[in-house]
Amino acid sequence: MIETFIVRIIFVGLVAFVPINPAQPGAPLSLKVLLPDVRGPVFASDGCRIPPHLPALFVEADSCKHGSYDCKADAELGKAFQGTPCNPSTEDGLVSNVNGPFSLLDQQITFTTPADAARLQFATRKKRAPPLPVNAHDSTSFSWVAGTQAGYTIDRNCLSGRPGICPIAARAIIPNGNISSCHLTEAVADGGTKSVCSYKFAPLFKARLKGLGSQALADAVMVAFTLPRTSNVTLHLSSIKESAESEIVLSPGKRAFVNIWVVNVPGEKEDHFDKCNDHDLGKHFELYYNIAARDAKGKPLPLAKRPIPHATKTCLPYERIQPDPKTAEGCPLLNFVNTKNKVMASADDEARFVSDSCKECKKEEGCYPGNKTACGAQKFPPWPPH
């Protein structure tokens, strides 16, 4: 048996990344990950309703303990995802063993990483590169996470111990690890053909996009690091509003990977009625400016001036450039199998059914990220600015 295993933390949906500059010269950079609060009601600048987003956690390991008890999923939150979560890309011939969802509302999550681990490493690409990746390896660059436009920085209240007025639903702290894009937004044509396209950023009603730079959009980001097999993975949970704390402990067993998914996406039922999301416009991006620093008068950037992604006609077939989830460059993305109409004799039967059905999951059963242009990730400039 291999003496180490890999921890993969996958962020999906409306998620903002903020590199934190060290207070002392030469100290390592860290990363804070913010999940904007979109519980609703929220509307885009054209009046369409943006559905509530669910800040949730899923895990896959040999065993999961929450305190001294076995992990128990949030039943009410689980109803919103409308299916049993599973990993269609399980390695080593092991069956999918996904546990969750667990609510992250008003929580800060800190991940245990090895003390001797390398500093944060961001996957990069060549400068002056084209607006689309040239291959799957190029697709892993963190540069595919769109940056804030118009020079906006993060509201520093969002980074404080008690964020107060900053509208975030949850927060994560990443001290080290290798950070990469691991899935790019795909456009699906009427005939089912999938492609990865580039996007230009401009306010919703700005008709002319000439002269603006363009890029593909990451809708899943992965942080990966290696631990000795004798180690457990500890997730420290603390309230961003109170003093309550708890821990989730994951054991690898014989698994090569321990997978952790942090998501901020609409529930499956709400997602079907999302009129603010299509492959051409990412209206949800307007919400990232809710957590941006305000102007000198304390006012946020007006909705109608907030840049969002507009699709261009520059596209490539997805199979040429999308990272393969079964390789180190890609990441496993959850599916949800609907067991409602199946008669199960036991919990073991249900687990076997989920494992067998996972790879056949259809979109209407709850697969995601579902290539939501509107739920691409966003990155802010490092804080504090130099």
Image (cartoon, grey):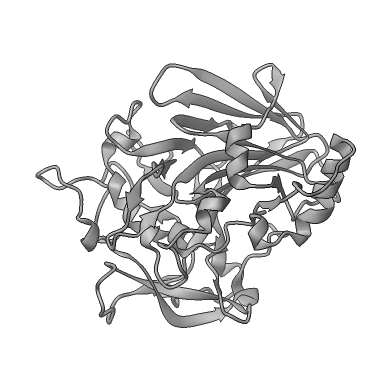
Residue 339 in the image: state x and y as whole percent: 76, 47
Please name whichever residue, 333 or 321, is drawn nearer the observer in this view of the structure: 333
Q: Quadrant of the N terminus?
A: top right
Residue 94 vs 128, above or below: the answer is above
Residue 257 vs 228, above or below: the answer is below
The residue shown at (45%, 55%) is 377
The residue shown at (14%, 42%) is 298
Please name whichever residue, 321 or 273, is drawn nearer the observer in this view of the structure: 273
Residue 125 vs 176, above or below: the answer is below
Residue 301 in the image: state x and y as whole percent: 20, 53
- The answer to whether residue 85 is visible is yes
Residue 220 in the image: state x and y as whole percent: 54, 55
The residue shown at (44%, 36%) is 170
The residue shown at (57%, 57%) is 369
Residue 359 in the image: state x and y as whole percent: 77, 59
Question: As drawn, is 259 to the left or to the right of 210?
Answer: right
Q: Residue furthest left?
A: 297
- The answer to whether residue 381 is visible is no
